[in-house]
Image (cartoon, rainbow, N blue to C red):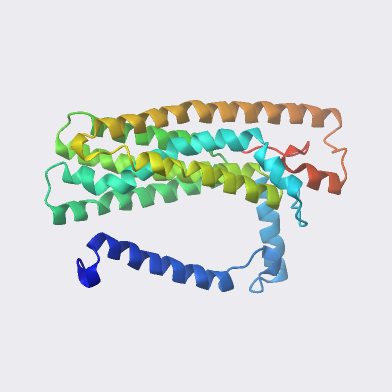
Amino acid sequence: MGDRRGLEAWSWIFILEGIATVVVGCISLFVLVDFPVTASFLTPEERAYVLWKKKYDNSAVGEVEAFAWRYVWAAFTDWQVWLHILTYFSTVVPLYGISLFLPSIISGFGFTTPITQLLTVPPYVFATIMLLVFGHYSDKLKIRSSFVILGLIICLIGFAINISAAPRGVKYFGTFFCVAGSYTSFSGVVSWLGNNLAGQYKRGAGMALHIGIGNFAGAIASNIYRNQDEPRYILGHGLVLMFIGIGFISVPLTTFIYTRINARRATELAKTGGVVQCSLEELHELGDRAPDFKYTL
């Protein structure tokens, strides 16, 4: 559709994909339900199970129903939100970098434009499979950090291959790791913070802050792959590797702090025989700072 109605081909891609997104979003507004308790398609038994499962997965002590600005402030002043933003940067820069410039990177290997477009598909197929595998076992084991680190390692291997002077076949193989590693680590980071923020409004504010500020990484990624650097893109790949290195620091640090807090709370609970000395209202107010809340590692 290039040059139709005075628009470039890339403009039509954004328009057509954007229309689909807007249509689905409008339909979702009326189809999706806010909470399990309002899901009319669930039986009472199914609704009770979903609520129990949700609480078990999140280690949540309760959900706050009435909005108050103090819950938003609690998210802004929570150390874990800001540390997770740093980790988010370490995954989003590689993700945006490979997503935006994969065609340019593959084109730099010497392939024609049609072949380049075809060769962008297999890395995403591989990444989809890896994402499903990572998601399944991460939920099954109830561990996030290990899978985030593993994703970053895969990402590191892929970008290290592409910054080298390896043959183009090897570099193309490396793009599979770039795509798979960035998407698997990204999804793990987002779900990890969601697991560890209790209270629907604190969680909502914390996730908005997390994703909102973290997406500034896209501005970085979109400006580091320059035309004059092709075909090796040493500047772009080098900066991506730097951000991956930041993740290798922030993820273990976050895990260490969570482990210390969990151990301290377990010790304090043991002193009271596992009985929480708080009312249900106090547990709601404390959220993830409740004495029986266990952070997901």
Q: Which residue: 28% across, 31% down? A: 235
- Residue 181 on image: x %, y %: 38, 40
Q: Percent position (x, y) of residue 173?
A: 23, 40
Residue 81 seen in the current view: yes
The residue lying toward the viewer, choosing from 221 and 121, is: 221
Please name whichever residue, 78 or 4, is drawn nearer the observer in this view of the structure.
Answer: 4
Residue 180 in view of the camera: no
Quadrant containing the C terminus in the rendered view: top right
Q: Quadrant of residue 270?
A: top right
Q: Is residue 66 left or right of residue 212?
A: right
| Residue 135 placement (x, y as % from top left) | 48, 48
Q: Quadrant of residue 260?
A: top right
Give the answer, above or below, for where 171 lies relative to 11.
above
**Measuring 53% from the left and 69% from the top, which residue is drawn there?**
28
- Residue, x 66% and y 40% (percent of image)? 76
Check the picture and name the quadrant holding the N terminus.
Answer: bottom left
Circle count = 0
**Identity of the residue drawn at 58% across and 35% down:** 82
Quick one: which residue is furthest to the front in this view? 6
